[in-house]
Amino acid sequence: MGKFQVMDHPLIQHKLTIIRNKNCGTKVFREVVDEITTLMAYDVARDMPLEDIEIETPISKMTAKTLSGKKVAVVPILRAGIGMVDGILKLIPAAKAGHIGMYRDEETLEPHEYFVKLPADIEQRQVFVVDPMLATGGSAIMAIDALKKRGATNIKFVCLVSAPEGVKALREKHPDVDIYAAALDDHLNEDGYIVPGLGDAGDRLFGTK
Ligand code: PRP
Ligand code: URA
């Protein structure tokens, strides 16, 4: 079973409180989502493989560590996942980005896929799927289905706020996928929103509604 990790670093928790506040405007919301994602990426990347290379410092030759050639892809679930892409690319600039378009039917809460564009060699890449919200889990499950159908095998899911319902559903459907969250909240309300959550992440990031 993949792990489920809540990242309780004080900086992450402090910044999450800023964006949960309903008075936080779009500009700050976007900036702080970016900052939190970078802080999370530091730990999400913890098991990236290293290899030895020979270099020369100004003083002597040495055998030093460098990231091995393992390739990375960051795949946001549109729209809200877009807000988390740069936060990861800042630390792993050689990563390629794919995109999966998914929206939830507001009545049924069922996800609908409308766009998939991935790096051609996705099956060789360590894939970080990013989306701020893991609510029912439907969007994450369908996005990971789409990735696996195209050959991806090494997948981690990174979100900001998760609900117990979504964590359970995602772990049941994709037990091989590690899940990283900045928070595990209480429950979903009757409209499928995470309580207390932060509202509609896409609308808050892009200033819609
Ligand atoms: C939100 C969010 C997730 C999804 C989570 O997207 O960004 O993708 O809901 O809900 P789930 O776990 O119940 O599937 P939304 O469908 O609102 O689309 P948007 O990002 O375009 O606003
Ligand atoms: N999607 C969001 O953007 N927010 C929620 O609380 C649930 C799903």
Image (tube, grey):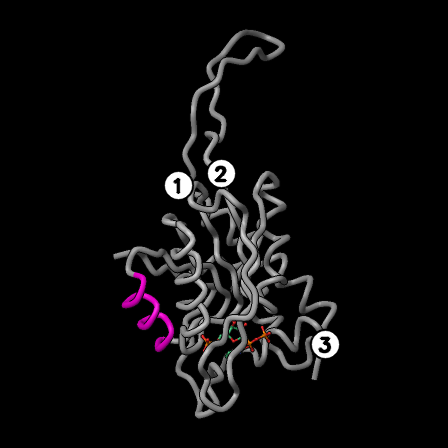
Residue type at tag 2: Lys
Outermost left residue: 1
The front one of 8 and 137 is 137
Residue 18 drawn at (x, y percent): 62, 71
Residue 95 drawn at (x, y percent): 56, 43
Q: Earlier in the sequence, mark 3 or mark 1?
A: 1
- Which segment is the magenta one? 164-174
Q: Does residue 14 appear in the picture of this structure?
A: no
Outermost right residue: 27
Q: Marks 1 and 3: in contact by CB < 8 Å? A: no
Q: Earlier in the sequence, mark 2 or mark 3?
A: 2
The residue pinned by badge 3 equals 207
Residue type at tag 1: Asp
The front one of 138 and 187 is 138
Report the residue at 36% width, 49% height from top. Answer: 153
Q: Earlier in the sequence, mark 2 or mark 1?
A: 1
